Image (cartoon, grey):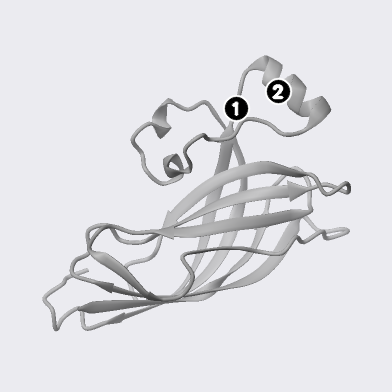
Amino acid sequence: MAEVHVIGQIVGASGFPQSGLFCKWGVHCGGAWKILSGSREGQTQVDSPDSQDTSYFSHPIDLHFATKGIQGWPRLHFQVWHQDSFGRNELYGYGFVHLPTSPGTHEIDCHTWRPAGSFMESVSQFFLGGGPHLKNPDLIYSGADRYRLQTIAMGKVHLRIGIILRNFDKFGIEC
């Protein structure tokens, strides 16, 4: 079977309303794909910079896939959270990116968004925190019903990813 090695890191996040961010991430791939090694999901530490707009995570990602075809190419999905001084966590955004199909090192920015909610939910969010969440997190990377959501653009998650392709030509798989 053809193999894909993904080696890199979640560098950080920028453009969010406040600092004190952490990121939950996961990988999703099609039925022809199998993860041979590496974690399917993870979470970064909280970074609370004093004077910077960017939170730095430097969280490693190391995945090894085997595949029979390119259909269902792997995607990384993210949830960015804010932790306040009282230790309360508030969702700041969802996002996903397809992993690059070409070998080499890639700098990727994942744009994030969050559900808008109603006027009453936004007033409640302002005074009490929290806010609307997705009932089904699969909507982050599957486009089935995502187009019907009212969303607000948030910041970006920055990635530095290296891709190594192995045995694609040997098994007749073209990228």
The label on residue 25 is: none
Q: Nearer the viewer, residue 53 or 140?
A: 140
As measured in the structure, the alpha-carbon distance from the residue carrying label 2 to the one carrying label 1 is 8 Å
Q: Residue at x 87, y 58 (%)?
A: 51
Q: Residue at x 22, y 58 (%)?
A: 71
Q: Quadrant of the N terminus?
A: bottom left
Residue at the farthest left position: 172
**Which residue is the site of mark 2?**
122
**Which residue is the site of mark 1?**
116
Residue 74 percent location from the top left of the image: 35, 61
Q: Is residue 170 left or right of residue 98?
A: left
Mark 2 neighbour density, 10 Å: few (under 14) some (14–19) many (20 or more): some
Residue 56 percent location from the top left of the image: 71, 65
Q: Nearer the viewer, residue 150 or 54?
A: 150
Q: Is residue 67 left or right of residue 98?
A: left
Q: What kind of element bears circle 1?
A: loop
Q: Is residue 124 above or below residue 79?
A: above
Quadrant assignment, res 174: bottom left
Q: In the rendered structure, which amino acid carries the disc numbered 2?
A: Ser
Q: Quadrant of the C terminus?
A: bottom left
Q: Earlier in the sequence, mark 2 or mark 1?
A: 1
Q: Is residue 169 above or below residue 47?
A: below
Q: What kind of element bears circle 2?
A: helix
Q: Nearer the viewer, residue 168 or 22?
A: 22
Residue 120 percent location from the top left of the image: 70, 15
The answer to whether marks 2 and 1 mark residues whose Cβ atoms lie closer than 8 Å is yes
Residue 139 percent location from the top left of the image: 43, 39
